[in-house]
Image (tube, grey):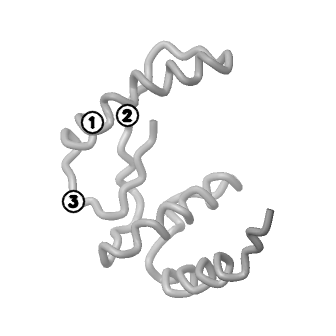
Amino acid sequence: MFIYDPDKSCSTDDQIRADLKPMTTILPMLLKKINIVIDALAIERITTTSKQSNSGDCGVYTIKYIEFLSIGRKAELVNGFHMSNWRRKLAVELYTLDCTP
């Protein structure tokens, strides 16, 4: 399990490992239900990402990490330079989303 943490000053490596310890058991159990068997799940904190400049952007960082990683781009490319534009873009996308059944 890779941990991309833009607010590195918030938690230590030991705190993150302790907080995520239950996931190292639960995720393999869930994966087994869909016939994906893994013996163990390691936790690795990625420290090469840029530092988040304020605590309010963690959700946008998370979304951008998912977007970048899903298209094969490096998470390290996500930084605060475009954050205000990404925040506005996300707001527009959510506002214009058609949620009718």
Point 26% across, 43% down: residue: 16
What is the spatial separation of the Cα atoms under label 3 and label 1, in whole angstroms? 14 Å
| Quadrant in which the C terminus appears | bottom right
Circle 3 SS class: loop
Q: Which residue is mark 2?
A: 43
User: Residue 21 lies in what quarter of the image?
Assistant: top left
Give the CA distance from mark 2 to mark 3: 17 Å
Helix, strand or loop status at disc 1: helix
Quarter of the image for the N terminus: give it: top left
Q: What x and y, as percent, mark residue 99?
A: 74, 68
Amino acid at circle 3: Cys
Q: Upstream in the sequence, badge 3 or badge 1?
A: 3
Quarter occupied by residue 22: top left
CB atoms of marks 2 and 1 within 8 Å: yes
11 sits to left or right of 29: left
* 101 is higher (above) or lower (below) than 95: above
The location of residue 41, given as percent across then percent down, is 44, 24
Q: Few, some or many C-alpha atoms within 10 Å of disc 1 (few <14, some 14-19, many ≥20)?
A: some
Residue bearing mark 1:
17
Q: What residue type is disc 1 on? A: Arg
Residue 17 x/y as whole percent: 27, 36
Residue carrying label 3: 10
Dot placed on the residue nearer the N-terminal end, 2 or 3: 3
